[in-house]
């Protein structure tokens, strides 16, 4: 389990202080730290709502002269870049942004492919780029300035990163977590099943989709091992459906959620209640099991996580990231989005990150981490124990879940992607199932990135 965060200038919570399960604040273990990746932080002094109203620290994008790397004179850096807080970044419609390919300064030997590939990464980093100066130091920063061609004064530098311009599962889980009601010994979750539109990235037109509680992936349902769970789903679609909790070992097989095997499908306007005991811990899922090729493909999927009653050292980590892959709606996606709109994993040197892979698609995806070993600690929710092993590529088949721990000890920007190359890169650069593990020197650096992202994020 993640460790409890301590806010700066605040005393640590007393172990004796009563806290109702499921009622911890967004900055608790069930909040920011649990959400992990870019939101799994320790030490943010305000809630996400407060971050949204606050400006991020002002950054200077100019880098000092460094041997072998260009320095930016103020004359070639627009004033908006020299000191820019995300809250005052100009609103520029992506459809009218000038293309970097219009510049007459295309480097020798480059083609339009290079320009397009660089544009994608520029969209990914956006106006977070100046933060890297304080995080990685002037020498590394100057190299990044050169790689991104910051001297071009490209418009993406004035825009929020692509991933903060679309709805994100992990951020939504922090801002508005799915909290259960209590009915005696039961934890009661209420979810709707809806027709929605989904933005795969900030530039593409939204696509028709389905979702739970009007989002895809649906909100994470999280309980403790041994909890009695009652999940009530209301069908707002124009078609019938059913819900299966994937990986749960039911005592009552009529709760298994397979229409015409264990139940009749429930029609538009109807609700269906599933009741069961979360008898084993692990990374599980919930999804449609009715016309599933279509309904799951269009977005009826979500994470069901059961925390162990007695966690071991393997289950103690600093940050956590849920990675739900799909390859139907909008192409190749992670948590409903394709690169550059995929939320990065951000961690500080010395931390341990848990990544929970969940494949809700129709294809195998070998997820490869650059620069770091993944220690595989569980498959389909079953701990591997002494059989845990290391790899840099983990192949996740349809319906499978793999839990990995990554111990980060070196800073940097590390690519992290499916290694079936047509799923991640083409003539216009990287797309689809690509992510980045951003390792920064200190937890304070994580906080700075998180605050900047949260201040620009508008949940949908």
Image (tube, rainbow, N blue to C red):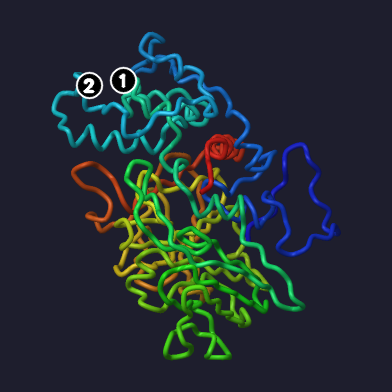
* Residue neighbourhood size for the residue with mark 1, other residues' Cα within 10 Å, grouped as few (<14), some (14–19), many (≥20): few
Residue carrying label 1: 152
Compared with 163, 131 (above or below) is above
Q: Which mark identifies residue 316? A: none
- The N terminus is located in which quarter? bottom right
Give the secondary structure at mark 1. helix
- Image x and y of residue 345, in percent: 48, 48
Measured along the vertical axis of the image, is residue 233 above or below residue 128? Answer: below
Q: Along the line of sight, which residue is nearer the eye, 239 or 398?
A: 239
Identified at 53% across, 80% down, the residue is 248
Q: Estimate the spatial distance between the alpha carbons at disc 1 and disc 2, rounded to whole Å.
A: 8 Å
- Coordinates of residue 421 in the picture (x, y in percent): 23, 54
**Pick the front one: 342 or 91:** 91
Query: Residues at badges 1 and 2 in contact (C-beta under 8 Å)?
Result: yes
Q: Residue at x 51, y 66 (%)?
A: 303
Residue 146 falls in which quadrant of the image? top left
The residue carrying mark 2 is 103
Q: Is residue 125 above or below residue 241?
A: above
């Amino acid at each position: 389990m993640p460790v409890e965060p301590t806010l700066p200038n605040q005393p640590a919570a007393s172990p004796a202080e009563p806290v109702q399960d499921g009622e911890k604040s967004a900055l608790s273990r069930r909040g920011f730290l649990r959400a992990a990746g870019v939101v799994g932080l320790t030490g943010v002094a305000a809630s996400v709502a407060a971050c949204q109203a606050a400006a991020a620290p002002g950054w200077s994008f100019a880098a000092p002269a460094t041997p072998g790397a260009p320095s930016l004179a103020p004359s070639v850096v627009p004033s908006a870049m020299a000191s820019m807080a995300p809250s005052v970044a100009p609103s520029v419609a992506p459809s009218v942004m000038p293309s970097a390919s219009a510049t007459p300064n295309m480097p020798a030997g480059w083609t339009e492919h290079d320009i397009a590939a660089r544009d994608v990464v520029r969209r990914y980093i956006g106006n977070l780029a100046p933060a890297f100066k304080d995080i990685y130091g002037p020498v590394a920063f100057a190299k990044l300035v050169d790689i991104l061609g910051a001297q071009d004064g490209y418009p993406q530098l004035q825009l929020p990163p692509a991933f903060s311009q679309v709805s994100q599962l992990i951020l939504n889980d922090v801002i508005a977590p799915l909290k259960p009601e209590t009915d005696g010994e039961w934890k009661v979750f209420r979810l709707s099943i809806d027709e929605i539109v989904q933005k795969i990235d900030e530039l593409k037109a939204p696509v028709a989709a389905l979702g739970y509680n009007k989002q895809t992936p649906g909100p994470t349902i999280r309980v403790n091992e041994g909890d009695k769970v009652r999940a009530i789903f209301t069908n707002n679609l124009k078609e019938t459906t059913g819900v299966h909790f994937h990986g749960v070992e039911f005592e009552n097989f009529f709760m298994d959620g397979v229409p015409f095997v264990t139940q009749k499908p429930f029609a538009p306007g109807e609700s269906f209640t599933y009741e069961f005991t979360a008898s084993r811990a692990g990374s599980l899922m919930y999804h449609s099991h009715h016309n599933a090729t279509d309904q799951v493909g269009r977005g009826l999927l979500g994470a069901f996580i059961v925390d162990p009653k007695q966690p071991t050292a393997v289950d103690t980590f600093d940050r956590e990231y849920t990675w739900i892959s799909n390859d139907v709606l909008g192409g190749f996606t992670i948590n409903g989005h394709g690169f550059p709109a995929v939320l990065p994993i951000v961690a500080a040197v010395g931390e341990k990150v848990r990544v929970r892979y969940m494949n809700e698609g129709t294809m195998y995806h070998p997820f490869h981490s650059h620069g770091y070993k993944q220690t595989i600690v569980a498959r389909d929710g079953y701990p591997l124990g002494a059989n845990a092993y290391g790899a840099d590529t983990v192949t996740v088949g349809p319906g499978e879940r793999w839990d990995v721990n990554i111990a980060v000890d070196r800073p940097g920007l590390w690519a992290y992607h499916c290694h079936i190359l047509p799923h991640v890169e083409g003539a216009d650069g990287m797309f689809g199932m690509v992510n980045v593990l951003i390792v920064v020197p200190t937890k304070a650096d994580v906080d700075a990135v998180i605050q900047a992202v949260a201040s620009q994020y508008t949940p949908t």
